[in-house]
Amino acid sequence: MKKTSLILSLYCIITAAYISVSLLVTDNKSSVFWFGFAAMLFSLSLFLVVTLISTNKSLAFPTELSIIVFSSLYTIATFGINIIFGYVLNIGLNLFISLHIVVLAIYLVILILLFKSKNYIAHQNSAANKKVYEFQAVISEFEKARNIAANLPEGLNKQALRLIDNLIEVLKFSNFSSAADLGDFHYKLTQMAGALSYEIENILSSKSEDLSRLETILKDTKNIINERNIQIRLMNENI
């Protein structure tokens, strides 16, 4: 809201200043002047609308900045045409109008491309975030198993926690890709986390001190992580 108010305030100040100065300093208000005057007001209004749209749609910062900067360049170009071709060179009305149309057409084409790139970036960010959340969900399943292992008898729990912490560390520092399809690996890892929790609960209920089955599960889990790392590495090499 504050950003919108600031943009509107700047627009009103710049527009009012332009209107006042243009009308006061120009004695010969020809057709070229009035068309250039209207073109400048149009460019300022277009700059306002595009800036408000780009800031309110929560675009990626580089895209938002590119749209705002390029829109300001269009306004500056419009002003430059008015000064150079309208006042200094004083060209004919038809050529003057053609110059404004060409500059506007170039601006609109690039503006459309910038908004399309915004959609692509948003799609890429959404896909990457989805993969991050998916991977974090896998890690959280092993952290749940760790919490259960904390209830094991003194001494036994330290040994189990050390083994599980080592696995979680390996998992956290494993390869990551937002492009590779890792759904099968994440499903397998989630299944292994469930098997780990089940084994810990069995140890608790039977009051056993045998961690061999737990160690086997952790070893198999590391094998899956290694296979996942290889898949990501191979995909990265092929990009």
Image (cartoon, rainbow, N blue to C red):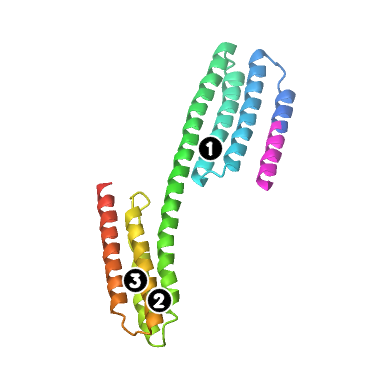
Q: Residue at x 37, y 82 (%)?
A: 206
Labelled pair 2, 3 in contact (Cβ < 8 Å): no
Residue 107 spot, x, y in % from top left: 51, 28
In the image, 113: left or right of 239?
right
* Residue type for callout 3: Leu
Q: Nearer the viewer, residue 197 or 169?
A: 197
Residue 59, above or below 26: below
Quadrant in the picture for residue 47? top right
Type of amino acid at the residue the image marks with label 2? Glu
Q: Label 3: which residue? A: 167
Residue placed most toward the observer, 63 or 81: 63
Residue 173 visible (yes or no): no
Rate crowding at label 3 as few (under 14), some (14 to 19) or many (20 or more) other CA atoms within 10 Å.
some
Measured Cα–Cα span from mark 2 to mark 3 = 18 Å
Residue that carries the numbered disc 1 in the rendered image: 67
Left or right: 86 in relation to 26: left
What segment is highlighted magenta in the picture? 1-15
- Circle on res. 201: 2
Q: Position of residue 235 (x, y in %)?
A: 27, 50
Of badges 2 and 1, the one in the foreground is: 2
All told, the count of numbered labels is 3
- Give the residue drawn at x 69%, y 30%: 18
Of helix, strand and loop, which one carries label 1?
helix
Q: Where does residue 219 sit, x and y in percent of width and height?
A: 27, 71
